[in-house]
Amino acid sequence: MLRSLSLLVCLSAVCIPAAFAGVSVSEPANGATITGGVTYVASATTTCSKGVGSMGIYTAPGVLAYVVNGDSLNTTLDLSPATYNTTVEEWDNCGGAATTPITITVKAGGSSGVSVSSPADNSTVGSPVNYTATATTSCSKGVSSMGIYTAPGVLAYVVNGASMNYNLSLSAGTYHTTVEEWDGCGGAATTPVTITVSGDGSSFGELQHSGGWADYGQRAPTYVDCSPSPCDDITFSFTQNIKSPSMSGEAIQMYLAGGEGYGDALFNNHLIGDDSSQGMPDPNHTLVPTLHNFTYDVYFWAGDIGLSQAVEFDINQFFNNQGYIWGHECRVAGGNEWDIWDNVNSTWVPTGIACNPVSNSWNHLTIQVERTSSNQLLYQSITLNGKTSTVNQYYNPGSAPGWYGITINYQQDGNSSQSPYSVYLDELTFTYD
């Protein structure tokens, strides 16, 4: 899907505005002198039909200090004493943006803050993860409590007082965590801490940024792959290195459209074995048969996830002419429930587990599976936005003559109107042992 930052559409010699966007900042005032934390309160508008995607605060050119999904922000930044030419920016879902500059001077004095001594930012750690932190505030009533967010809106732990020392159990994957303090005057301060939790095995990280992705269309009832786009009245594409929306600065955009309902777009990547994108072709067929445990960890974002019939995340293992396909389908317009794939009968089986991803927000998904010692597929668990649901269902493998290797799939399905929509994937990690 093409995105443009053009502000004017010119017809002959006349140029007219193509879209209007604006940022209104109610706090801080331009030119203000502030002691302590700087509170930013702002809202954004746009004539883009898809609305505002996100907003952010730059404390200097190219220095993005804060970003939030949606058309409003309310946050406090702890800044060292200095004069700052800050900018509040909004990005809409049509590819446009608007800014409002705010110059402030920060003076030394009482302030609120969170100091995190463990874990280190951008570190790789094992689980459980030790969080050690302290908080300060200029509020006369002191610090009331502290907490750990493992994802936006997912509060995993809270403790009363101005210090914490807690071991938090997390599945393998990358987490953009935040340690926050709340004081007795209604104020708050945060410190972001990005960590990668390692599993017991080996991992491929940032796969959304990797080479090796391929895309196909599929049309019911045969679901035979077609390519390139458009084909079978399905339009599909992927675009890497997307900056916004993004958590890493290099998300991948998956796009689906077309002229007939219920068309699908399939995106896959061969990780180990034949056509490996990770430099692991396993030509002697000695590695793939030894692997039993797999984790698929990913963040995904959609402006309106309700346009999706379903989104699908699959782990596939092929050897000895057998196919082990751990298919996980989140039905959205199809009923907000997780289904899993029965290899032998080639059918989806409802799990009874709810699936309610959030629009205009990053959703964090972790799926864990196992090939048992008796060569059955075990669906272990699904974790969405901090809530873990145990699946614990076993299935037999199917037939897959001539296939060899380990691959991952992502698929998005069109609704009855084949409404066009994009889903963005980021921080995609695959762990195996």
Image (tube, grey):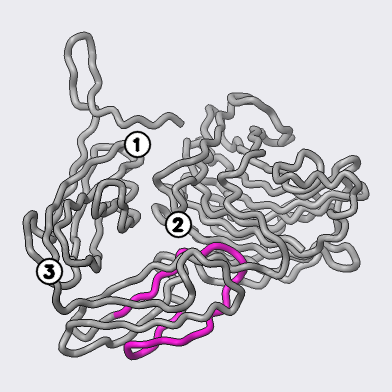
Q: Magenta includes 183?
A: no
Q: Which residues are magenta?
A: 157-181
Report the front residue among 289 and 225: 289
Q: For residue 20, what is the image quadrant?
A: top left
Q: Which residue is mark 1?
A: 94
Q: Are marks 2 and 1 in contact (CB under 8 Å)?
A: no
Q: CA distance from mark 2 to mark 3?
A: 35 Å
Looking at numbered disc 2 in the image, what kind of residue is underneath it?
Answer: Trp
Q: Secondary structure at mark 2?
A: loop
Image point (11%, 67%), residue name? 34
Check residue 114 in the rendering and tell me which mark sits there, or answer none: none
Mark 2 against mark 3, which lies toward the viewer?
A: 3
Q: Which residue is mark 2?
A: 362
Q: Going from the N terminus, do you reach mark 1 or mark 3 first?
A: 1
Q: Going from the N terminus, do you reach mark 2 or mark 3 first?
A: 3
Question: Dot 2, how many residues are within 10 Å of its Cα: few (below 14), some (14-19), or many (20+)?
Answer: many
Q: Quadrant of the C terminus?
A: bottom right
Q: Going from the N terminus, do you reach mark 2 or mark 1 first?
A: 1
Q: Secondary structure at mark 3?
A: strand
Looking at numbered disc 3 in the image, what kind of residue is underneath it?
Answer: Lys
Q: Which residue is mark 3?
A: 107
Q: Are marks 2 and 3 in contact (CB under 8 Å)?
A: no
- The answer to whether any part of residue 157 appears in the image is yes
Position of 277 with respect to 72 (left or right) is right
Position of 174 with respect to 77 (left or right) is right
Q: For residue 275, what is the image quadrant?
A: top right
Looking at numbered disc 1 in the image, what kind of residue is underneath it?
Answer: Cys
